[in-house]
Amino acid sequence: MAEACVILDIGGVLELTPQTGWVQRWSERLQLSPGTVHERMSDVWQAGSIGSISEREVHEQLAARLGLDGPQVEALMADLWAEYLGTPNEELIAYVRGLRGKCRLGILSNSFVGARERETALYGFDELVEEIVYSHELGIEKPDPRAFEAACAALGVRSESCLFIDDFAVNVEAARAVGMQAHLFEDNAGTIARIAAHVDAGPR
């Protein structure tokens, strides 16, 4: 019988990440039409999410593709990270902290190169859970089944014993497809109740 396990997403779950409008502000500042920033940078953003590009290379591509100088690159990236990192979901984080020793705990996050260092410094997620699987380190993003399998493998648990929490339905469905239980995050109350039911049910 396997010990119960809970694996959580970060952005939109452990972090509250409303849109800040930084792309629109930069588009206006650079006198670019709406959509141009993402159009020029989409492959760079994708490369950063699977770790095939370094932070330095991201900065170089921003300068080359948007015509930015060094201070502008730093300012744009600061705005990007401000939205990406959001603010901590204190209630849920405190609840998860209280689960230590009661079940296995992990994180599976679609991420961007540089995320581990920043989230560790700001929020200490490395001390909240046993294992963090970041897409930019794994080279695979959710909803690829291999991402969920990697998270289970990192914790040494069977998928059936795991409850996965995410704010995107496609990822919740993908987790279920590999045998995990899964819950769509919509609010703290419902999510905490679902986790409690999973942990209280004991080994499975």
Image (cartoon, helix red, strand yellow):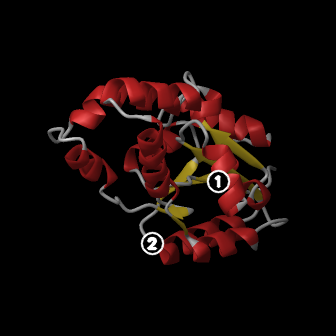
In percent of the image, x 16 and y 42: which residue is there?
34
Height in image: 48 above or below 201?
A: above
Q: Secondary structure at mark 2?
A: loop
Instruction: Give residue 155's quadrant in the image.
Output: top right
Mark yes or no: residue 111 visible: yes
Q: Secondary structure at mark 1?
A: helix
In percent of the image, x 33 and y 53: which residue is there?
22
Marks 1 and 2 sit apart, C-alpha to C-alpha, by 22 Å
Q: How many discs appear?
A: 2
Q: Nearer the viewer, residue 32 or 8?
A: 32
Height in image: 50 above or below 117?
A: above
Q: Which label number is shown at residue 166? A: none
Callout 1 amino acid: Glu
Q: Position of residue 119 (x, y in %)?
A: 64, 54
What is the crowding at mark 1: few (fewer than 14 residues within 10 Å), some, or many (at least 20)? some
Q: Nearer the viewer, residue 96 or 192?
A: 96
Q: Position of residue 126 (x, y in %)?
A: 76, 53
Q: Which residue is mark 2?
A: 187
Mark yes or no: residue 160 visible: no
Q: Dividing the image into 4 quarters, which one contains the C terminus?
A: bottom right
Q: Nearer the viewer, residue 111 or 65?
A: 65
Q: Which residue is mark 1?
A: 119
Residue placed farthest to the right in the image? Answer: 101
Height in image: 91 above or below 202?
A: below
Height in image: 191 above or below 35?
A: below
